[in-house]
Amino acid sequence: MGILKKSSWLAVSVMAVAAMLSTAAQAREPGVPPSVPPGNTMGAATGASPPPGVYFSSRTGYWDSELRDDNGNFGGQSNTLADTALQFMWVPGTKLWGGDYKAYVTLPLIYNDQSRTAPFPAPLQGDSSKTALGNIEIVPFNLSWQVQPGIFMSAGLSVYAPTGDFNPNAPISTGGDFWTFAPSVSYSYLRNGWNASIFATYFTNTENNTTNYKSGDELLVNVTALKDVGGFSIGPVGYFRKQLTGDKNNGSYYGGTIQPKSEQAGLGIGFSKRFGPVEANVNLTHDVHVRNTVGGNKLWLNVTMPIGGKR
């Protein structure tokens, strides 16, 4: 009986160590990606609202990344990530509290090819991949105000539904079995050929219905500073992501452990060009600071076009 108890405790200990290592993969619930990739609004004049109509946008990113621990050292995991987010926006031309109203929905598709080596325990090492829908973003309202000619501010609320593929026993998930609520504010300076925009979002999550794990709150700030030069815009872009509150594990999954808080900052260069009613934006970024999450180089391609109404 004593041998059985000792073996049980050993198994539990191994599971706990494995869980602690795997939690660092995204610095939130193990295997679950952030609600949005940091830098998702770079290149956009997020404080302003387009003319009334219906708009379609696609954001596609390709990212070679590595897991970094609390000291910035390689954590034994490499990821090749590709994501495409399809967004449909409705701008009815309605005023609410003096601001221009719009609403939109974003459908993310995520591909993750992952490789793990030491220091992950042998049962967690190896290669895996997954392609699936992520958690859908629903924005029931976003309001934009022109505070001065060419200067805009906006505020809104995003709700992320648990539509992604989630399996707590798999090395990769494309979403979590929980809801995320994210209020946001933005500022855009659109004078003299400039698009200088700051977009800030605060993410708070409900408890996962499957695992009773609650991921901590996060702050994400995206920055754009593009200047028109002979018909196209160029300039620096960047982002900063920080987990502000700790996780809570109210269940027995992942050995009862929680993950450490994450931080991430990236800098890069952006280009934008209009082709008639279509606007294309390309960004190239590099993570200059990565703690308890994955980071690296990323290439972005964003396209926006009207598909209905007046332009």
Image: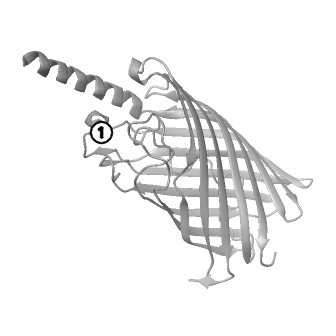
Quadrant for residue 86, please give it. bottom right
Which of the pair 167/78 is nearer the observer? 167
Q: Which colour scheme is used?
A: one colour
User: Identity of the amino acid at label 1?
Assistant: Tyr
Residue picked out by circle 1? 253
User: Percent from the top left, x then y, of residue 310?
Assistant: 80, 78
Which of the pair 195/54 is nearer the observer? 54
Mark count: 1
Relative vertical location of residue 2 with respect to residue 270 in this rendering, above or below: above
Q: Residue furthest left?
A: 1
Quadrant for residue 309, please give it. bottom right
Quadrant in which the C terminus is drawn:
bottom right
User: Left or right: 222 with respect to 202?
Assistant: right
User: Percent from the top left, x then y, of residue 133?
Assistant: 56, 50
- Residue at image x 66%, y 68%? 89
Q: Residue furthest right?
A: 230
- Residue at image x 54%, y 60%? 137
User: Percent from the top left, x then y, of residue 23?
Assistant: 39, 34
Relative vertical location of residue 103 with respect to residue 292 in this rendering, above or below: below
Q: Is mark 1 on a helix, strand or loop?
A: helix
- Residue at image x 76%, y 60%? 304
Quadrant in which the N terminus is drawn:
top left
User: Left or right: 67 with respect to 47?
Assistant: left
Q: Confirm whether residue 44 shows in the render.
A: no
User: Percent from the top left, x then y, of residue 8?
Assistant: 18, 23
User: Left or right: 286 with respect to 256?
Assistant: right
Relative vertical location of residue 298 with respect to residue 207 in this rendering, above or below: above
Q: Confirm whether residue 66 shows in the render.
A: yes
Around disc 1, counting alpha carbons within 10 Å, would you say few (fewer than 14), some (14 to 19), or many (20 or more)? some
Which of the pair 64/146 is nearer the observer? 64
